[in-house]
Image: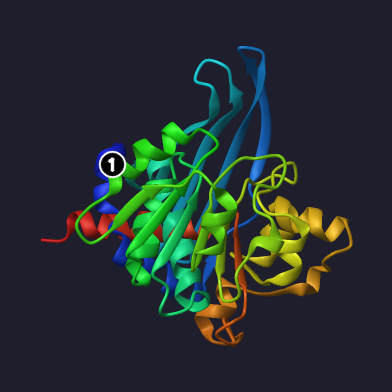
Amino acid sequence: MRAFAWSEAVAALELTSLIEALRQAFRSGGITAPPPQRYEIPARHGNAGTLVLMPAWQADDRLGVNVLIRFPDDPVRGEATAEGAYLLLEGRTGKPLAAFDAGALTARRTAAASALAASYLARPDSERLLMVGTGLLASHLIEAHAGVRPIRNVLVWDRDHAKAERLAHRLTRRMLKVAAADDLQRAVNGAHVICCATVAPEPILQGHWLPLGVHVDLVVGDTPAMRAADDETMRRARIFVDTREVALVEAGDLIRSIRSGVLRPDDVAGDLFELTRGTRAGRRFHDQITLFASVGHALEDLAAAKQALENALAP
């Protein structure tokens, strides 16, 4: 069995091939992915934890399961934490094929799913990206979006400006200028793509700030208690999700706007199955505001693990 630690998993999950692997997985189907199973586990440092199991399988092919232990609001590290492993098995025999650091796999497939959606929803001429949040996912999301659109300028905003400055300094390179923004509203006004990856309980992004033609990528928490965008953002946008069945249960931004009466469930224009198969149009005109709400899906984990192993074994 091949074992992939964090750095090895990231290296094997090259984003160009991963985005295409996800496109084909959603387009072709055939992967069974039941809803995640959650179990409360004993508290650590006074905080209740959750064991999350996310299985998926393809008939006569591969089977995989993501095993995560989440401790929100970890007081030792001062942030939400999730640790675990992804196990890839041979579907007919159950033979273990590979094990991955779950954090690395999740970061890369999440970024790839956002970029896949942006390839249908963001304007083809998008050059300016705003990254809201400086957590684990931020650098992967910037890399992924720059892989599907001609992103040349990136602004990074965080409540802690010093964190934004450090991330910008680390990511700036010859073909990609990255800078820290101190005024979020101003940064939003100049963006072509806005990517939010936060665990905020209340909205950061205000809908009346949004310029026409912008694409909003919400990498949201998988609980209704979290949201990054307000009702006005959701009302103004043509909304897409990973999968309807998961998003309507877990996407806080979507659920809370439905509860407030701003949206109805059928206001979700489509999901990645429909976008990749061409059964639902993405961006319909230049000035349209589009939005992708991502909560993740076990199909993405399985497709990513298969692609990583294939990349690693390639001569």
Residue sitting nearer the eye, 229 or 249: 229
What percent of the width, then of the height, locates residue 36? Answer: 63, 48
The residue depicted at 57 percent of the width and 76 percent of the height is: 213
Residue sitting nearer the eye, 185 or 255: 185
The residue depicted at 84 percent of the width and 69 percent of the height is: 264
Mark 1 nearby-residue class (10 Å; few <14, some 14–19, many ≥20)? few
Local SS, label 1:
helix
Image quadrant in which the C terminus is located: bottom left
Residue sitting nearer the eye, 245 or 154: 154
What percent of the width, then of the height, locates residue 165? Answer: 38, 38
Q: Eyeballing the image, is 180 above or below 81?
A: below
Q: Is residue 90 visible?
A: no
- Residue identifier under label 1: 170
Q: Eyeballing the image, is 226 above or below 111?
A: above
Q: Eyeballing the image, is 211 above or below 283?
A: above
The residue depicted at 50 percent of the width and 43 percent of the height is: 182
Q: Amino acid at mark 1?
A: Arg
Image quadrant in which the N terminus is located: top left
| Name of the residue lying farthest toward the left | 315
Q: Quadrant of residue 78?
A: top right
In the image, 5: left or right of 93? Answer: left
